[in-house]
Image: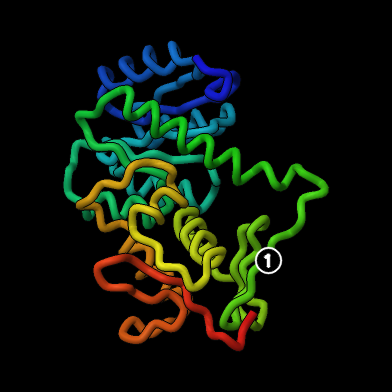
Amino acid sequence: MDADDTVVSQRILVVDDDPRICRLLCRYLEKEGYSVDTAGSGQAMWRALKSRPYNLIILDLRLPGGEDGLSLARKLRSQTDISLIMLTGRSDSADKIVGLELGADDYVTKPFDRRELLARIRSVLRRAASRASPVSVSDQDNEVLEFGGWTLDINRRELTRIDGVPVSLTSYEFDLLAAMARRPARVLSRDRIMDLIAHRDWQPLDRSIDVLIGKLRRKLNEDPNNPYLIKTIRGVGYMFAPPSDRA
């Protein structure tokens, strides 16, 4: 294993009611240096979370006991910032979009290639580490972007209105807004946006970026028929275009 991929002390919780999937992932990920626990239901997941900290949860969409993965993901995001990868046998893109909207960091469909899943795990954990690292650097300049009556604090990961009221963003929504706000008046393709916020290959049929753009526009109080901050460049991608009289 390369030095950059050292995963000592990183702990993963696999939540899936299929014991074969749990055994497969447990054996494979432990060989890659991760500490892995498994849970077969939402109740077992909550018990595990109370017993020890985790860096990442791999959560199956379909679970027994009344609570499915989407419901659990919603509760997880309201209580914790643990990295989250959704795992499911469903191929419907709507499920993927809902999972990402709820704050999942990535989404993998069964059957999956173990090496692809490992690459996604590493990518999600690297992003989590990069988000956390500025907080521990005492001399890090506080990057604050202001545009159109909004203030985006990069290090605090906070978006506030002109009156100081904070606006809640999911992890993906914040990363998307930060990536675009740092590159005003530049046209960004969907491929480029995905590289900036997810650091993984973009799937050509995936429209998750469009959904995230739509949610951001609503949270920024933009008219969907005449957006003034995030403009659609037809056939190309999107451009962040704050009013010229704003910082």
In which quarter of the view is residue 199 placed? top left
Q: Residue at x 56, y 33 (%)?
A: 50
**Tally of numbered tags:** 1
Looking at this view, name the residue that lies furthest to the right.
139
In the image, 168: left or right of 136?
left
Camera-side residue of 116 and 240: 240
Q: Residue at x 58, y 27 (%)?
A: 52
**Position of residue 236 measured from the top left corner of the image (x, y, whole percent):** 29, 66
**Position of residue 230 measured from the top left corner of the image (x, y, whole percent):** 42, 74
State the quadrant of the C terminus: bottom right
Up the image or down, 164 lies above or below 123; here it is: below
In the image, 168: left or right of 60?
right
**Position of residue 93 measured from the top left corner of the image (x, y, whole percent):** 21, 51
Camera-side residue of 154 and 39: 154
Q: Secondary structure at mark 1?
A: strand
Question: Which color mode does the image show?
Answer: rainbow
**Position of residue 2 measured from the top left corner of the image (x, y, whole percent):** 52, 17
In which quarter of the view is residue 156 placed? bottom right
Provide the residue designation for mark 1: 144
Callout 1: few (<14), some (14-19), or many (20+) C-alpha neighbours within 10 Å?
Answer: some
Camera-side residue of 78 and 31: 31
Q: Amino acid at mark 1?
A: Val
Q: Residue at x 21, y 32 (%)?
A: 110
